[in-house]
Amino acid sequence: MVMRYRPRLRRDDPFVAISCDNSLSFKTGTQRSERPVFINKIAPCRHACPIGIDISTAFHLASQGNIDGALRTYLQDNPLPGVCGRVCYHPCEAECSRGNFDESISIRSFERFIADHGQVDIRGDVPIHSRKEKIAVIGSGPAGLSTAYHMARLGYQVTIFEGRSEIGGMLRYGIPSYRLPQSVLNRDIQRIQSLGIDIRGNTTVGKEVSWKELSSFDAVFLAVGLQSGKILFEPFGVDFPVISGLEFLADPQKWSLSDSTQKTLIIGGGNVAIDVARTLLRVRNGNGGNITVICPESRDQMPSLSEEVNEALEEGISIVNGWAPDKLHRKDRKLVSLDFYQAEVRIDETSGTLEIMRVGKKIKNLAVDKLIVAIGQSMESDILPPGIEVKGGKVVVDEWGRTSLPKFFAGGDAIGEKAFVADAIASGKRGALAISCFLQGRDAVSEFQAYHLGKSHTFSFRHFIEGPENDSVDLKRVVSFDHINTLFFSESPRNNPDRLDPGTRKSTFEEVTCGLEPRQMEEEIARCFRCGTCIDCENCLDFCPDISIIKDAGVGMYGFDSDYCKGCGMCSVACPRGVVEMVEETI
Amino acid sequence: MRMFLTGNHAAAYGAKLSRPQVIAAYPITPQSPIYEKISEWDGQGALGARMMRVESEHSAMAASISASLTGARTFTATASQGIALMHELLHFASGMRVPIVMVNVNRSLAAPWSFWSEQTDSLSQRDTGWLKFYVADNQETLDTVIQAFKISETVFLPTMVVLEAFYISHFMEPVEVPDQKLVDDFLPPFEPAFRLDTDNPAAFSQTVTQSQYAQFRIQRHQAMEDALEVAGEVDMEYQKAFGRGYGLLESYRLEDAETVLVTAGTIGCTARVAIDELREEGKKVGMLRIRLFRPFPKEQLITSLRHAKKIAVIERNLSPGQEGIFCEELKSALYSRVNGIPVCGFVLGLGGTNVSPLHIKKVFAITEQMNEAPLKPILNIEDEDAFGI
Ligand SMILES: Cc1cc2nc3c(=O)[nH]c(=O)nc-3n(C[C@H](O)[C@H](O)[C@H](O)COP(=O)(O)OP(=O)(O)OC[C@H]3O[C@@H](n4cnc5c(N)ncnc54)[C@H](O)[C@@H]3O)c2cc1C
Ligand code: SF4
Ligand code: SF4
């Protein structure tokens, strides 16, 4: 039987919805009430770094095998990556997002790694001596080196005056070489010097050169630090030297302390005290039986970094907590013993000052042959230009580092910055911005506002040099852990550097902490989320249900096709690192 | 060949004889024996189709739609919660005009849990655009499955063949299983109008404009209307080839009947016995069994019932807050053409309880007493006094 039925439409009429074309005619963009914004932001590590180093970008470059690029990124802000990669107190790691997930990234080890393995000649990037203005920098510690470096990058002619024979300030004369090898310091300094900076050692301003002679310079940056160690008791006679920790560290061999039978007390609970004890241990060839560090603070309150304290304990240094010095006893002209009273310390959180309180009536009497005091540093009054305003032993400056004398700026320990290398570098960097604005008649306040990072006290030097054009970073926004889509990451343990075995290391000045092996570093690099930094992972592109992500939307960033993007927000969820966010559609 | 088969196995034979190429299904009581029988053939290498053991009914229907789009003849079977889970894809199937044939074994829907016969599972899918046959016995099950492929593949709409749990699914009856050759002659291979073709990529069921959407909906409705004629023709053709036909409606002793019972499914078989007995007593009674529920054969219904004085409807389903769905549909069909015939709706056998000849006789007795049709469904016929009989 022949079927009479035919579909009412001809067989080739589409009674089924079929499209061999595409659905571009449906401009789904009209449905949008929110739209994605693609913008890089500041990673929390960068926000926490006093120098404001663009860590996430450096990690990204390193992940592509570009160690040189990573180093170049560091050098945008920090002239001393080899130094910081070893001795920085790494506040960046405390804020690392990864810390909320498993363990923070070994950021300091990364800095050391790229400084040791990267090869960068920055001379080509810098308009050396392109400006006629001359800048004098007094002091070659981290603050002075930082100002000199950044001023040179801006094209100024820089001269550093340094009273000592060697360059580096406390990096050279304070921090012991088992923590910071001289060769590493020299390498960083040579790079700085390669920018055509004139360095004059053995030239104390005020002695070899008069302050007046500096009048030919257009600006002066004072980075004189705090050079005298505070002393507790007045020394008297040759048999009773009270040595300051700073004096000892500047030349450990000079003090005839190598006899390990001499009972040596080190008073103080900071890094200097620990450095003194460990240096003395090495001077005594690893024999630490008679070396004791004693301080009023409890173990937890000690201002020195806990890793330093632990290493000292491992090496056999004894540390006595909760006792403050009281009276000394001598016989004939010789020191015999010291009385200590039992103490408690209250630390004022805001000012950082401590109050030492006596508890009970107990007295501890310790026999002593030699006494080293490491309770802080102070300003030498004669190293400053006459007439400059000083208060509480610190040079008085405004927020741009301007002192009471015209053309004179100051930074670092001398102005009471936090006494750390990174903070000294940061103040030098800020000083460079301020001096160049001053010389060019630009407003430092608005320049700093434009380039400062989030709520921190630092700014992006690259942006200051290059200006804001064509940039895809919002310097004001910090990505928090909430913005990280952790579904894209799996847990993996942090790689910590190896240390020399305590038995071996305590009798040598060899560097205690080793660098990470390339394989370990590779793992650390892979662990970094690269918070707020677009790395072309293309997740947004893959997940967009409307195929509306545009890969090259200018300034190296992604964009969206406003004709079709429905504003579903999938891209912002799919971005693992908080680069994409949704904002209300305004049109 | 004459075989002694359950309704489920009759369905399986009907499917196998139709030479499907893909069967995607998920087992569920009381449909499982269909699934098992087909699996058994598959295991023996005797199926001749690709059997897909999917993870849910939703997937079963999704797979069936895709298979059918490629041009494969596709069969599936389900019941109760299974068809409920398929719901959104049932709309897809008809919207994409794929001629899938599916057996649904009527089973009560939860809650509470129950496994017996009830029609709400398939009636809930009334507006999904599927053709729906309600069959009365095992032979009709087998025959209707074969017919369904032919109808579906002509109008490009899917068809559901509905049989009641246990009354048909697990009941054994002698069934005439036709020769494969005969079925092959009746049912030529499937030739789709459009197919999924990797060499000519296309998107099916893409987003369309508002007016395009309206047009597709109207076309589907028109195809459904056309299916009425096609189903009638296919049944006649089947009668010629196999010697068995059913019509879209079954009329039983209707010629001079004054009180007519309208029903669907197995109650129709039972009713024949009751009607024979009542006729013997001289009562002018007859029956009309609705076999095709979608498209709804309105015109045939009106013609068949024009001369009835009173109508009773018995059915195993209840639309809460309204009445039995067959009764409601019937009234709506009659309303436009025939006035004044009281229609009494009886909802009996819910949850699979038996509707016996005795019950049916009572229904006739109650209906004859009625001068005005009740507005509410009659749910209980035990209390005879209430009806004055
Ligand atoms: C023992 C020790 C260990 C430390 N360890 C750490 C550490 O592990 N991590 C950390 O972050 N920080 C550490 N610090 C602190 C850190 O070294 C200092 O905060 C930092 O060096 C300060 O830098 P600066 O440039 O302000 O001063 P300095 O480093 O003190 O440099 C000042 C320089 O100016 C020179 N100078 C002074 N007056 C004149 C003048 N009139 N003419 C010419 N030259 C002059 C001095 O000779 C000196 O070289 C440590 C400090 C000490 C003492
Ligand atoms: S300088 Fe210090 S704070 Fe900054 S990145 Fe290096 S280790 Fe971290
Ligand atoms: S995960 Fe990487 S980018 Fe993010 S805070 Fe840590 S080091 Fe910085």
Image (tube, coloured by chain):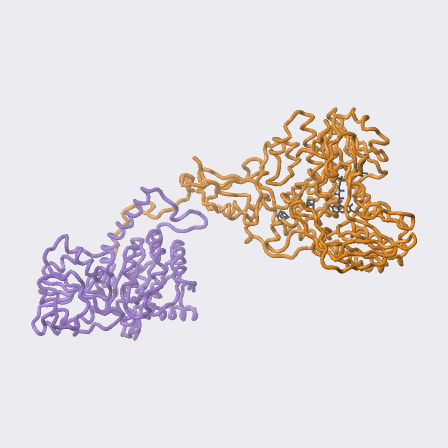
Does A122 sit above or below residue B86? Answer: above
Of the chain colours in the picture, the one used for chain B is purple
| Whole-percent x, y for residue A571 in the image | 50, 45
A207 sits left or right of A81 in the view: right
- Of all residues, the one furthest to the left in this rendering is B282
Does A459 sit above or below residue A542? Answer: above
Of the chain colours in the picture, the one used for chain A is orange
- Of all residues, the one furthest to the front in this rendering is A361
Q: Is residue A73 visible?
A: yes
A262 sits left or right of B239 in the view: right
Q: Is residue A285 visible?
A: no
| Quadrant of residue B362 within the rendered picture | bottom left
| Whole-percent x, y for residue B195 in the image | 39, 51
| Whole-percent x, y for residue B172 in the image | 29, 75
| Whole-percent x, y for residue A228 in the image | 81, 42
Does B244 sit above or below residue A359? Answer: below
Point out the image quarter for the N terminus of chain B: bottom left
In front here: B339 or A13?
A: B339
In front here: A470 or B236?
A: A470
Point out the image quarter for the C terminus of chain B: bottom left
In front here: A9 or B322?
A: B322
Q: How many marks?
A: 0
Q: At 58% from the left edge and 53% from the top edge, which residue is drawn?
A: A489
| Quadrant of residue A28 within the rendered picture | top left
| Quadrant of residue B160 within the rendered picture | bottom left
In front here: A267 or B255?
A: A267
B13 sits left or right of A305 in the view: left
Q: At 66% from the left edge and 49% from the top edge, which residue is drawn?
A: A93
